[in-house]
Structure formats: structure tokens, C-alpha cells
Amino acid sequence: MAATGETVGAVGAPGSEIPTPPAATDAAGALFDALPVPALTRDASGRLLGNRAFLDLYGGTDSLSADLVRDLVQTPPGTAREARLAHGDGGPRDVMIRVGGPPWVATVEDVTDQRQTARGLELATEKLEEAYQTAKLGYWEYGILSGALVLNDAAFAVLGHGRDRFAPSFDTLLAILHPDDRHGFGNMLESVVDNPARVYVEYRVHDEDGRVRYVSSSCAPRLDADGRLTHVFGVMMDTTERAEAAAQLEAAKQRLEEAYRTGHLGYWEYGIHSGALVWNREAFDIYGQDPDRFAPTFDNLLGILHPDDRMSFGNMLESVIGNSRRVYVEYRVIDPAGEVRYVSSSCAPRFDLDGRLTHLFGVMLDTSERARAADALRTAKERVESAYRELQAAQDSLVQTEKMASLGQLVAGVAHEVNGPVGVALTTASHLLSRAEDVKRQFSANALTRSALAGFLEVAQEAGQLLVGNTERIAALVHMFKQVAADQTGDERRTFYLREYTEDVLLSLHTQIGSSGHRVTLTCPEALQLESFPGAFARVLTHLVRNALMHAFRPEQSGEITIDIHADGDDWIEVVHADDGQGMLEADLPKIFDPFFTTARHAGCVGLGLHIAYNLATQTLGGHLSVRNTPGEGAVFTLRLPRQAPTLD
């Protein structure tokens, strides 16, 4: 270490032979050397001298560079400059050299810690500003005494105003605040001024485009060293999206609540850990309970459940807890009046962010009316099914009766036809017997002449011919009766000639046709065959003819029914049944094949004839039966049949 009062050359290097300056020998020099702070002075020749404190801290004047020495020698009093010196411990130090005088004296102040603190503060400020920018946080500062309002760039962005268009002041800030929020914002500032503490506030502003923005801000006081409030500092964040999302969520919640009220839906929530059960108003209404008298707890709910449904309700909760999925259940509750109410409910799990089950949530609906309606519908269905079975039985009975009636009419017709030849045969046989007795008497009396015997033989021959002819006629009628009767009462499938069979069917209706005064004309090729169910065909044809005889003609009219049977291609046969009667009403056409529809119920008609014919044509014969009508000109029924009927199941 150099001795006290060591000199420093013009270039800052210590001299090997340095004379002691005159100042060091007088009182002023001693005072300079005794200064408690590092200091420099210069002698009359302009060389720098360091006091003991300077030498102790910086280890000699060699810590001063030649440039620094040159600048300091020329620095006038009243100025200061920064420099960096080598400390005695070997580390660099930042110093502030302040020149005073006269006499010329420069104090050396170590500002290393201050500079490090300033640099740290600057770095922290940069990081904070970066954090503000990253988080889109704005900050503002308002001077209580100056009235100055300072905003950073992020604050301008939060407010939606450009720095070049918006002059930050308290008045301009109030101007962009939403009118409904200005009072609250002023109360916030007053609260901080009157009671220095951090305050949080949310308010709305209008951006430069006139749109409303939501801002969330914190406000805190700044105090000076004496504890006096000097500034109000705040941080702000644009919460428009969050506010709009919250508004949409609230609107959705209100719509959901309205939907619950409109749809009379109740909801409930059960806390797994707390055991708390929460109902909405509709849930109380569904259960028929008074919110002021009934506490919604799990035990109370079990108490109003129907005893037969408590087990299933508990199983529902266990299923949701065990399987963590939505479950649907229907149960009954008993209201305070003792009436049973039906409730349909769904139950779903609620989880926290870690996926743990925390709540059970459910929606319920009063289905009492639906349940009663279902019971009534079930009862009505059973009655309808019973009535339908009875109707089917009645219809089957009517069909069977119709078959027997047809058979009876067939018997009557055949009996009428047989009556003629039987009468002729009986008369012929009686006459022959009488003549034979005469011949016998003559023979016994030996009075039989040759001419009498010849006459008897001639009569016998004629009688035999009459007997044979009429007997064959009777046999044909009986055969036809047996065949048609068997067909109409059975379901045998066979191949038959349409013309011959249709003539037999019309013959069985001869009595009815003859007594009606109408005539039936048949047109059909001789060789046209059909492999089908002749009984069903006969019944269809019979119903069509009877329907025409009963309904087609006016009482005073003598009408004609034409039946035209012809081939329709290779696979189909068409039977066209037409009359020249009065026709039908257009309103009756869509119902003509309906069961029990008739326009002559007063005459004892049941209304099953055409219905039976339609079913036989479409189901048994596998064909189609349709009708067309021209009022005043008669009705035309068209029966289309496949040449080979489908096999019945």
C-alpha cells in the first residue's frame, strides 16, 4: 500500500521519486488525508493525490486509468462523473466521482450496490412488463396530487383505445366508462384514498369502436416514506370473453330453468360426501310436498317412496355409483294426501377435475297422468281385444251361417230342379204300372189280343225312355249338388273348367234368379281352365250375383247381369261382373268392401257378402277384386285371378 499523500502522475502511474507536496505538510493537507471518505486532490502542478481512505479501499492510485486522470485534472468543480475502479479485494467497483472546490477536491463514492439494485429493478421491470404483455395485463398509476394518469401499452389494449387517440386522464377515463359503472369506479378510488387497502372492482368501458368491454381491475395505494398516500396503482385485465361467456352461461341457465318450469321437470343433486340433497321447486311439486314443511333429505325421500319401489331406487343409486353411468328408473311416491304419484327419473354422475365422483344429478318428471292413461289404455286394449275376438267369432259364425244358408239355397234350388223330372218319372211309372195291370188281367182271362199287347209294349218303351231321361237328369242334378256343396263347404284345390263350373253355380242360383225377374248372361270359352279353389270361386261369384240381385236394380226394373270370363295373358284370368242397374253412390265406393257395410240394413242385410268375397278373392284365391261405378248405368266388379292359385299356409 502506498504512503499517505502518494502522488499520481499525469498518466496515472506512481512515480519512483515523488516529492511530498506542500499541501501535505500544512493543516489543510492533514485535514484532507483525514477525510472519512475516499477523496482525490491535485497539487499546484496538476497531479492527483489520494487520501488514506482512497488508498485503503482501492490499493493505490494505479486503479485510475490515464484517461480518467487526464479527464479529472481538467474537470472543473461542481461536476460529477461515473467511473469503474479496481477495489482492493480485486473486484471492479462502480464509483461516482464528484468534484468540488475551491480548493479542488474530488470525493469517490462507491455506487456498485446502487447500480446493481437499479439494474435488478430494471430487469425486474422488464420481466414484469413482459409478464403484463404475455398475460395481457395492463397497469395504471394515478397521482393523487398531480392528477396524472399513466397507462402502459397493455392498458390501452385492454381499454380498446390507441395511445395516439386517447389522452390518459381521469376525466377521459370517466368518459369511456359505462354510465352505470362510473359511480362504482369513483367509490373504489374513494375507498382506497380513505382506507389505504387493495380493492378489486369490475366495470365496463366503451372502446373506440363503441363496443362494450368488460374490465377486471385491482387498485392499491402507494405511500411515501412518511406514510402519506401519493399514488393509486392498479392492474387491469380484459374480461370481456369471460363476461360474455358468463352471460351466455347465465342465459343458458335461465333458459334451462324456464325449460324445467315449462316442462314441469324437477331436478335434484345429491352430494356423495356431504349427503346434502338439493331439489328445485318443480321437484317439490312433482312429489306433492311443501318446501316450507318438507326437508329434502335422503331419509325423508325414502320415507315417501312407495314401499315396493325403495329397493329399485336404491339399486339405481348403487348402479350409478358403481358403474358411473346414466341410469333411468321409474318409481312411485306417496304424497301428503295419500295418493300415489308416478315419477320417471334419470340419474347421472358428476365428477371433479381429478375424475372422482362427487355428486349424483337427476331429472324427474311426473308421469302419473301418463301411467293412469297407460292403465286405461291397457284396459281399453284388453276390452278391444276381447271385443275383437268376439267379433271374429261372430264373423266366423256369420260366415258359417252364410255357408249353410248358401247350402240351403243350393238345396232348395236343386230340389226345385229335381222336382220336375221326379214328377215326370213318377207319373210315367204310375201310368206304366196301370197299363201293366190291365195287360195282366187280360192275360189271366185269356182275352189279351195281339193289338193290346203291341199297344202295351209301345207305351212301355215310351215310359222307359221317359224314366231313363228323367232319372239321368236327376242323377246329374244330384252330382252337381254334391260337387258344388262340397266346394262351398270345403277348401279343396283342383283344376276345373270355368264355363262348366260357373254354369253349375248359376244353376244353384236358378231359383233366386228366376224369382227376381232378372236374367244372367254368361260368356266364357269352353276350354278355359283354372287351378284353384272352386269353393272359394263359387262363393265369390255367388256373393256378386246376390249383391246385384239385392241392390243393383230398382223394384220396377227388369235388369240383366253379364258375366264375362276371359284369359288375361298367360298367367291371369279376368272375371267381369256387370249389371245395368242404378249404380252406387260415389261416397259408398271406398267402403263397399268394409265389413258390415250395407245400404239395405232395413231389408235384413248384414253387410258381409262383399267383404267375404273380397277376402276370398285376395287371400284364398290370391287375386284382386275391384269395383268401378257409373251412376245410372250400373256397377262393374272385376275379379283378376292367377291361373294357379297360391298355396295356402
Image: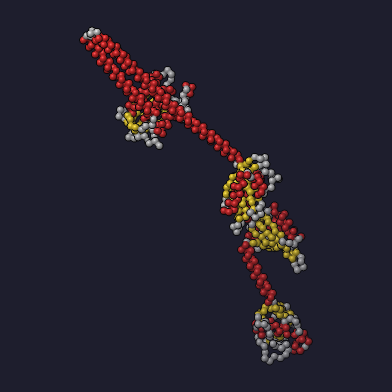
Q: Residue furthest right?
A: 27
The residue that appears at 35% across and 26% down in the rendered structure is 482
Q: Residue at x 68, y 85 (%)?
A: 59
Front position in the image: 578 or 266: 266
Examine the image and state in which quarter residue 29 appears: bottom right
For residue 329, side relative to residue 638 (left or right) = right
Q: How is the image coloured?
A: secondary structure
| Residue 568 image position (x, y, % from top left) | 34, 32
Task: Please say whether residue 213 is visible from this viewpoint.
Answer: no
Tell me the residue at 73%/89% (across/down).
21
User: In front: 619, or 479?
Assistant: 479
Position in image of residue 647 (x %, y %) = 38, 36
Q: Nearer the viewer, residue 59 or 465?
A: 465
Residue 245, image x and y in percent? 62, 53
Above or below, 464 against 244 in this view is above
Q: Residue placed farthest to the bottom in the image?
A: 17
402 to 338, vertically: above or below: above
Residue that appears at 75% across and 82% down: 36
Residue closest to the eye, 339 or 33: 339
Quarter of the figure that contains the C terminus: top left
Residue 419 seen from this side: yes
Displayed quadrant of residue 44: bottom right
**For residue 176, side relative to residue 563 (left or right):** right
Query: Where does the N terminus fall, quadrant-wise?
Result: bottom right
Residue lying farthest to the left in this orientation: 450
- Measuring from the top left, give residue 102's x and y in whole percent: 75, 81
Label total for image: 0
